[in-house]
Amino acid sequence: MDFFDFHHHKKNMPNGIYNLDIEQIPPDFPYSIGIHPKDIDVNNLDNQFKWMKNMIFENCFAIGECGLDSFAETGEKIQEEVFLRQIRFANEVKKPIIIHCVRKFYEVISFKKYAEQPMIIHGFNKKERIAEDLLKNNFYLSFGKAVFYNLSLQNTLKITPLDKIFLETDNDDLSIEELYEKVSEIKGISLENLNKQISENLETIKNG
């Protein structure tokens, strides 16, 4: 059984979405491309967007990771402008949006009205209340390594509908199969059915 890794940084793993770092050349398997809040260069923004637009090839699955980060050096206003510009670009190229969010969830929710494409919060590890608010606003949640040890997150995972879930390794040294096994145990669903549901979720977001 193949397990899809929704967001990862490993160049040798084609069964998933590889997160392309700024100014990189895309691989020949699924990737996402975007301007991370921590990579925003205010003096070079036009070139950063030019790079992004020129690297949209057949294997581009999503725009991202992009979003808002309260710890990034770039000011809030610039972050919001760059995020909105990427949302509009995703609408134009008809790609889902992979979101990086640090302590800015309600601000991110306020941007949902601009998006015509599905929005997915990657590496979600917050409490039920934030998850509920995101789900109410039709966001998808992608879970990673934290589900192994964060009991509060395990409860959040339990209340998250299966048709709103993705799983990812991100930067962690982790087997995606182990993560699927753990989530199938937490959700009380067979590994096969979990894998099938996530495949269906992928098709849903791919088709907007």
Image (cartoon, rainbow, N blue to C red):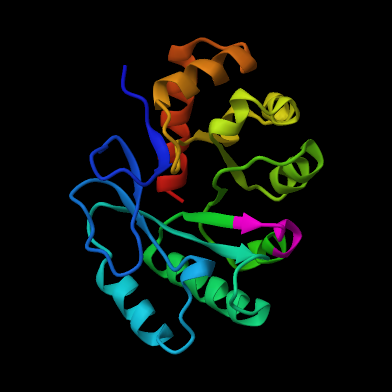
Q: Farthest bottom residue?
A: 43
Q: Is residue 186 above or below residue 153?
A: above
Vertical placement of 106 versus 3: above or below? below
What residue lies at 46% left-to-right and 54% top-to-bottom?
Answer: 96
In the displayed structure, does residue 99 sit left or right of residue 93? right
Residue drawn 26% across and 67% down? Answer: 55
Q: What residue span does the magenta drawing correspond to?
A: 101-107
Q: Where residue 62 sits: x, y (%)?
A: 40, 55
Q: Nearer the viewer, residue 164 or 51?
A: 51
- In this rendering, the answer to whether 84 lies above or below 186 is below
Residue visible at 59% across and 36% down in the picture: 164
**Residue 157, x across and y down, in percent:** 67, 28
Residue 105 magenta-highlighted: yes
Q: Could you say where residue 122 lies in the image, as x and y percent from the top left?
A: 54, 47
Q: Residue at x 69, y 29 (%)?
A: 150
Q: Is residue 179 left or right of residue 112?
A: left
Work out which residue is located at the far left of the displayed protein and give it.
Answer: 28
